[in-house]
Image: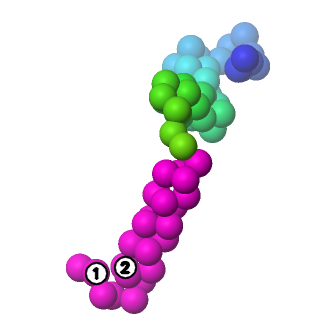
Amino acid sequence: MLIIDSKDCENIDKALKKYKKKFEKAKVLLQLRERQSFTKPSIKRRAQVLKAVYKQQLATGKFE
């Protein structure tokens, strides 16, 4: 549960902005999307490897 400490004189827009920032840092939405469907560990590893290969190719300039 996210708790936002707000002062009495603080604007509601500032409090809402703080809440949104905390919400993104907590990664609640990402966890919900991950839990919607099960992904096998082997597929997760394969995706990580492909991502690493892509980043490596970008860094070396082979992939354009």
Three-letter code, disc 1:
Phe
Q: Nearer the viewer, residue 29 or 4?
A: 29
State the image quarter where residue 3 is shown: top right
Q: Which residue is mark 2?
A: 58
**Other residues around mark 1 within 10 Å, as few (<14) / some (14–19) / many (≥20):** few
Residue 33 in the image: state x and y as whole percent. Answer: 49, 29
State the image quarter where residue 32 is shown: top right
The residue lying at 55 percent from left, 27 percent from top is 35
Residue 13 in the image: state x and y as whole percent. Answer: 52, 19
Q: Secondary structure at mark 2?
A: helix
Residue 5 in the image: state x and y as whole percent. Answer: 76, 19
User: Quick check: is 46 in the magenta stretch?
Assistant: yes
Q: Which residue is mark 1?
A: 63
The residue lying at 38 percent from left, 81 percent from top is 57
Q: Which residues are magenta?
A: 41-64
Q: Secondary structure at mark 1?
A: loop
User: Quick check: is 40 in the magenta stretch?
Assistant: no
The secondary structure that most of the magenta stretch takes on is helix
**From what the image shows, is residue 31 above or below residue 52?**
above
**From what the image shows, is residue 4 above or below residue 26?**
above
